[in-house]
Image: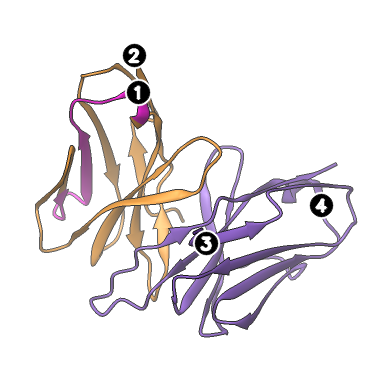
Chain colours: A purple, B orange
Amino acid sequence: DTAVSQTPKYLVTQMGNDKSIKCEQNLGHDTMYWYKQDSKKFLKIMFSYNNKELIINETVPNRFSPKSPDKAHLNLHINSLELGDSAVYFCASSPMGAGGDKTQYFGPGTRLLVL
Amino acid sequence: SQQGEEDPQALSIQEGENATMNCSYKTSINNLQWYRQNSGRGLVHLILIRSNEREKHSGRLRVTLDTSKKSSSLLITASRAADTASYFCATDGGFQKLVFGTGTRLLVSP
């Protein structure tokens, strides 16, 4: 059983289009995240939701809009796609650690290529 | 700015050898984690070490933490081809937030 799943795995689209990526976790975690990994493998957090509430929003262009319909799902919608949006987008989840542990469980990634 | 920086950026060894990678960070931490990323996959948590711990073991992994030097090292003993992956350190950057390092790409040749 997949713990954190993302769809689609690959996304190839034209500049200016709008696209969505979906994420689901079946671990019962309260917190979910979106990360962007660029071509140099640098991984940067974009958003985090805790129990459907936005708690982290890291200076991401407002073309990116996350939505959490329930605590098991966190989707990412991107408007007016640009070439620089090409990257691998990872969803992750974590429990609320009693000791401040923040072990995160990652999805397989969505490889976005904007042409 | 980026919290963790790993060294070396890339490491190539033979099966059976040990692999050591280092992570340096800039601010005080509560804990530090190491993750592995196989090619084309998501990150997988390996081990967490708290700021009051100096060393931790998990199977063939040994992690050290020196808070005075703001550095950590990950040692993989008796490496296998299956250990080929990128390894990232991650430090806590505030509420429920992890800040990842630049990663070390490890290649283990048979």
Q: Residue at x 40, y 50 (%)?
A: B44
Please state if B35 lies on the left or on the right of A9 as rendered. Answer: left
Cα distance in 3D space between marks 4 and 1:
38 Å
Which residue is denoted by mark 3 in the rendering? Answer: A4
Quarter of the rendering containing residue A101: bottom left
Spot occupied by residue B18 in the image (x, y as percentages of width and height): 20, 25
Which residue is denoted by mark 2 in the rendering? Answer: B110
Disc with the residue nearer the chain's start (2 vs 1): 1
- Do the residues at pointers 4 and 1 share their chain? no
- Callout 4 crowding tier (Cα within 10 Å): few <14, some 14–19, many ≥20: some
Mark 4: which secondary structure?
loop
Amino acid carrying mark 1 in the image:
Ala
Label 3 resides on the chain identified as A
Amino acid carrying mark 4 in the image:
Glu
Which residue is denoted by mark 4 in the rendering? Answer: A82
Mark 2: which secondary structure?
loop
Spot occupied by residue B78 in the image (x, y as percentages of width and height): 19, 25
* Residue contact between numbered discs 2 and 1, judged by CB atoms under 8 Å: yes
